[in-house]
Image (tube, rainbow, N blue to C red):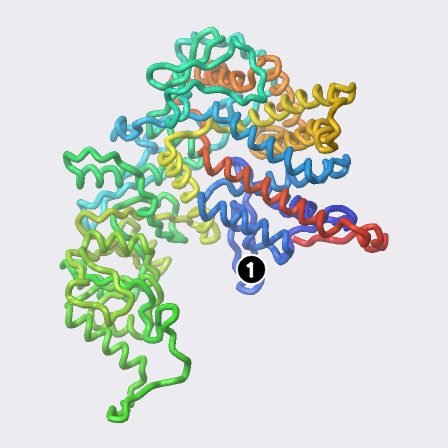
Amino acid sequence: MVMACRVINKRRHVGLQQLSSFSGTGRTFLGPVKSSKFIVDEERHESILISSVVRLLESLDLTSAVGQLLNEAVQTQNNTYKTGTSTLLFLVGAWSSAAEECLHLGVPISLIVSVMSEGLNSCIEEVVSLQVPIHNIFDHIDSTKTFSGLETCGVSLCPFLQIPSDTGLQKAHDLKDVASPSLTVYNLSGIPVRSPKLFRPQAEDEANKNTLQNPQTLKKSLLADSRCRKSILIHSRHFNRTDSNRWINKPEGFLEQHGAATPHTYRCNDLVELEMGLSHGDHNSMKLVDAAVRLQFQNASTQQGNCTIPFMFDISRIFTCCLPGVPETFSCVCPGYITVVSISNTTLIKELQNQPVQIILIEGDLTENYRHLGFNKAANINTLLESMKVQQDSSEEQWTDYVLQVLIKFNVNLVLVQGNVSEDLIEKCMHSKRLVIGSVNSSVMQAFAEASGAVQVAYITQVNENCVGSGVCVTFWRSIPSDVIDRINILTILIKTEGINLVTVVLTSPLPAQMQAREDRFWTCAYRLYYALREQKVFLGGGAVEFLCLSHLQILAEQSLSKRNHVCSGWLHNTSSWLASSLALYRSTVLKCLANGWHKYLSALMYNTANCSSELGASTVIQQHLQSATDSGSPSSYILNEYSKLNSGIFNSGISNKLEQIPSVYDIVTPKTEAWRRALDLVLLVLQTDSEIITGLGHTQINSQETEGFLFL
């Protein structure tokens, strides 16, 4: 599919230009406010609405080598973390342009690679100071305080501004299942919250300083990394700080900032606060995640009894069921396995719902010709014994009759299959009052194996009495009105058993084209919370870490520039190494180009989110904050002070009296830093590969008429 095109100069590094072009297609996906794109399938004449980089790249023509490398990097990031792909794609483009600029200025490729790698590693060390450890978050869980019931003025998108949105969150409405009143169902209806502005100009900041309230109202806290709680936090060796702004250890492991009027401690031990910070404006999706976590917590508490094993959020036991054509108000979370089956199974479900049934679990396909890898026999070859009489029935019919006999022998009425299922077998089993469901998630299979006592097998021939599970219930799921079910012509059923560790999140959307984006947004929020709880730490978000990286690189560049002046004046007169002298001369240039990538990132983030008419205006605001951070002597302290002002009311005067309910914004640590690393690794790989291909005698003999072309996306 052709999305856009860009003029490619063949005399320059084509790979870097292609990376910049691909990156430009996903600029609108950066930040919490995303501008969706319609993707049209010309063959099927269907369209979907996308708001993620992964879905975008699936629709682009990525046949080029650079496109394949970019797609692999994005897919790896998504498969591992389910988040950070927009950041990765944007930084790939920004740093590709930075590498091109360095080449244009005559910087050797080896120095570009080494200095950019050094600069990013230094940034990752520096942003450790903005980590907020998470301690005992489930020890303080409050059943009366849920994400859906939290009244909030809005979500802060950066450390420099917080403005409440005009619309709040709607409280949840409980819908009870008609068929099973005891079933716990969380209906999490709500309306989208308009995202606030990202930055406020420096002039407005200064005008609001007079409204600063009592510092005693400060309550947010920043903790040191939980893995080094008793160690003193030492900043990067490249950073020259004044002694008046430093961090010292406290008995509880918290960090305290000295040099300010009042010391501030930072911490996060509240689940709702963490979820609000990680939602990034997508409140509806995070409310579903919150309900799923609480169901798992309740289930774990019931099963453990007096056991004191700490609770861990198990994202592998969360399953989604998508129902397009249904209003979003019917999105909900409930225990058990909810799935969609053919409307022709209505009579069968009515007969099965009043009795516990037995179950078997098939790991592979349930078809006649299915074999494990390495056991597939040659096609069109049948082996028959001479004494055996050839039967008239086909092998497919013989096999389906055999499967049915096995189910009857062990009195099995429910079969869950991880792979595909023969259509003839489904039809025969339905007439025999047996339900067969295919394409079941592996985690669902494992959950039913643990709860029902069933043993998963690869072939139906392996089934014996020890493989059969019991105590499973199959019922209609009636949380959606019957008229809506008739309109969409599907049947939703609930399968559960006592003690099953499985939660189904039902996702609905009135527009089928939005269904994929709805599911992607849910999993993004779920994985943000999962990695935050697993790592027990988060970053102060909303552009804080990127701003610190930008400021840090600028200071390093200034230090390198000062060192270069010493080199030019003969400071290293005894040094004969060409590499050492070149590094001193070009290091400042490369660091500035790398910093420009962060500047472009923040400018695009502001332009996409804030009330800025252009990226140029956003760049001006960033420059003003950079100057303030530099003048303060410690950019990290400047950022923390801005967060403190948010929570103390400097930007909220006259807006809300419930300042304690205004949340901070958080980012997950490892997925963010890994996105940075993958982006730079890809750029440097393409840079070095380009240099090996285009340098040499042939590069200088290109016909001038062939120096330009078009890259189609």
Residue 572 position, x and y percent, is 73, 22
Vertical placement of residue 660 versus 710, above or below: above
Residue 47 position, x and y percent, is 53, 56
Does residue 17 appear anywhere in the picture? yes
Identified at 51% across, 35% down, the residue is: 673
Residue 558 position, x and y percent, is 67, 21
Q: Nearer the viewer, residue 305 or 40?
A: 305
Identified at 41% across, 14% down, the residue is: 218
Residue 251 position, x and y percent, is 33, 15
Callout 1 secondary element: strand
Q: Is residue 575 left or right of residue 680?
A: right
Identified at 55% across, 42% down, the residue is: 678
Identified at 33% across, 47% down, the residue is: 316
Vertical placement of residue 451 versus 135, above or below: below
To which quarter of the image does residue 215 belong? top left
Q: Nearer the viewer, residue 270 or 386?
A: 386
To which quarter of the image does residue 457 belong? bottom left
| Total number of numbered discs in the rendering | 1
Q: Is residue 498 left or right of residue 424?
A: left
Does residue 659 appear anywhere in the picture? no
Quadrant location, the N terminus: bottom right
10 Å crowding of disc 1: few (<14), some (14-19), many (20+): few
Vertical placement of residue 460 versus 663, above or below: below
To which quarter of the image does residue 584 belong? top right
Amino acid type at image mark 1: Asp
The residue that label 1 is drawn on is: 41
